[in-house]
Image (cartoon, rainbow, N blue to C red):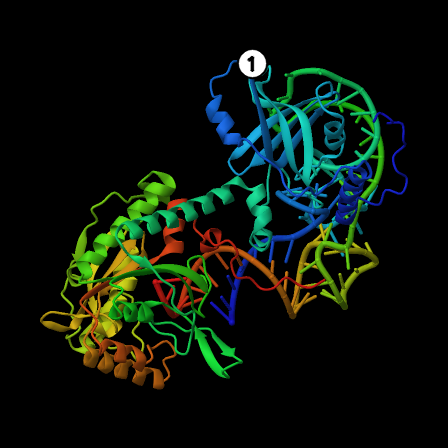
Amino acid sequence: MTNETDPPSEDAAAPTLDALIAERRRKRETLADQGIDPYPARFDRTALAAELHDRHADLEPDARTGERVRLAGRVTAVRRHGKLSFATVADTSGSIQLLLQATSLSGQAAVVLESVDLGDWIGAEGEVITSRRGELSVDTTELWLLSKALRPLPDKWHGLTETDTRYRQREVDLLANPDSRRVFEIRFAAIAAMRRLMESEHYVEVETPILQPQAGGAIARPFFTHANALDIDLSLRIAPELYLKRLVVGGFERVFEIARNFRNEGVSTRHSPEFTALEAYRALGDVTDGMELTEALVLAAAEAATGRTVFAAGDVEIDLAGPWPRRQLLDLLEERLGRRVHPTDPLEDLRAVCEEHGVTPLPGWGPGKLVFELYDQVLLPGIVDPLFVVGFPVEVSPLARHTAGDPTMADRFELCIVAKEFANGYSELNVPEEQAERFEFSAAAKAGGDAEAHPADQAFVRALEYGLPPTAGIGIGIDRLIMLLAEVDAIRDVILFPMLRPEATN
RNA sequence: GCGCCUCUAGCUCAACGGCAGAGCAACGGACUCUUAAUCCGCAGGUUCCCGGUUCGAAUCCGGGGGGGCGCACCA
């Protein structure tokens, strides 16, 4: 293995990407020529990098442990010093250094080391030691190639910065940018924690249709598709709400779904056409129980994912530590506007108040919508720390129970943090006739050209006629919650494969 | 949809009307304690695409494409 007298291969192609790949293929063939399988079927690993760091945190420099381990991971750095080399290997838990001495390596290990490239998956066996500089290392005797990286990795120091490539080739982003990986670790830890909480509260996780004859449960424009077998047009769901309440009618008293929703609307830093919401319904509860559950879920997610309650959001810090204040929307508006407003006020008055505060009323807006817009455009931007805003106009809450003694207001809350809505919930409307009436009203708006008005859903009304118990419902925007916990400001940074235009074909 | 910004070697970036360059990665070499290793050498380009202006275009202009940000719609 020491015939190093060959001149540089004279047919070396130009080191464009193709040539870099060809070079790595050549190395792979070199191994195969020597009887080394470049794609072995499996590997028995006995230790993870992080375990070793935990177990041997206090070793002196130049120490030996006598502990032999088998590691596997991706090569992220190689430092060659002639007969001594160092390599850094990253596995799912973290990174660890391999120390590779020519005098210790097996014949195969030496051959594998000769051809190893940044990005290759390797397995290594050796003794856990510390280097003379004190770095925990594996004094390697055996080395296996587990899978060849034919494509070169991004710059090990700068990583991958081009957003386009980060989103299109998320796998490369994840392996090259630790921060990106961290965001998704937070995401999935948070979701798992919320699932655990729901389970401990005896909610059943269910699945409802994504392909629906008629998209309901929210005010939004759906995507459409077509089912060939039935020759019918279908919508992709905009919310699971109506189906979940039908399950409560059916006797599943506590249900939840972590639902991917689809809305054919604008794309922005805060909006993705495809987004995830947790919706939960609890029989016998009301809007108060909904707020309690919402707060518990967010805190459980924050605790499990980060262990903190204080987060940076832009240039402000917010503290999630509860309990969160619960304030009536109409009271908050009175404080902000200097006068009391209510959906029963004359339309012209409400329009005047809107104009006065920079909200331009649109022609179709009723009094409830005007009040809601005052909230959305005037009140919401000023909210920083978590706040439950309670009591919304019925006009903009077609599925919520109206407030006792006030048919124009609904027992509904929104959770607001740093000027954004994070969750929404209410006492569910369970009077079939009233629901049918609300649907008629919104269906008229839809017929009048409002593409986002809620459609009448007869199957849902029929379900209510079998009896929906008093029920609390909530919906939490998972992506936005993750943005908060991970302290990133683009929703695409918390979605693994965000929607993009297709790549240009070569 | 509208406005602004952006696209140069595999990656990260220079050059801003005058020979398209550097660092990392690659390739050849030296090196048994490095950790962004170091040193010597070598190679690498459809400057996103099409067109125009110009003696000369990565650079200026027009059109197109990808992406980002802002506005609008929405959560």
Which residue occupies the foreground of this view, A340 or B38?
Answer: B38
Q: Quadrant of residue A160?
A: top right
Residue A390 can be seen, yes or no = yes
> In the rendered image, which quarter is residue A403 located in?
bottom left
Q: Residue at x 37, y 83 (%)?
A: A449
Residue A10, position as x, y percentages in the image? 90, 39
Q: Which residue is mark 1?
A: A63
Location of the N terminus of chain A by quadrant is top right
Residue drawn where x is 29% and y is 63% of the image = A376
Total labels drawn: 1
Badge 1: residue crowd in 10 Å (few <14, some 14–19, many ≥20) = some
Instruction: Give SS at disc 1.
Output: loop
Q: Residue furthest left?
A: A405
Image coords of residue B65 (percent x, y): 63, 66
The answer to whether residue A225 is left or right of residue B53 is: left
Say which amino acid is labelled 1. Answer: Ala
The vertical placement of A461 against A31, above or below, is below
- Quick check: can you spot residue A363? no
Q: Which chain is home to disc 1?
A: A
Left/right placement of residue A58 relative to residue A76 reads: left
Residue A35 in the image: above or below residue A377? above
Q: Position of residue A341 (x, y in %)?
A: 16, 68
Q: Residue at x 47, y 42 (%)?
A: A182
Q: On screen, B15 above or below A254?
A: above
Residue at the image position 30 percent from the left and 41 percent from the top: A309
- Which quarter of the figure has residue A506? bottom right
Q: Is residue A413 left or right of residue A16?
A: left
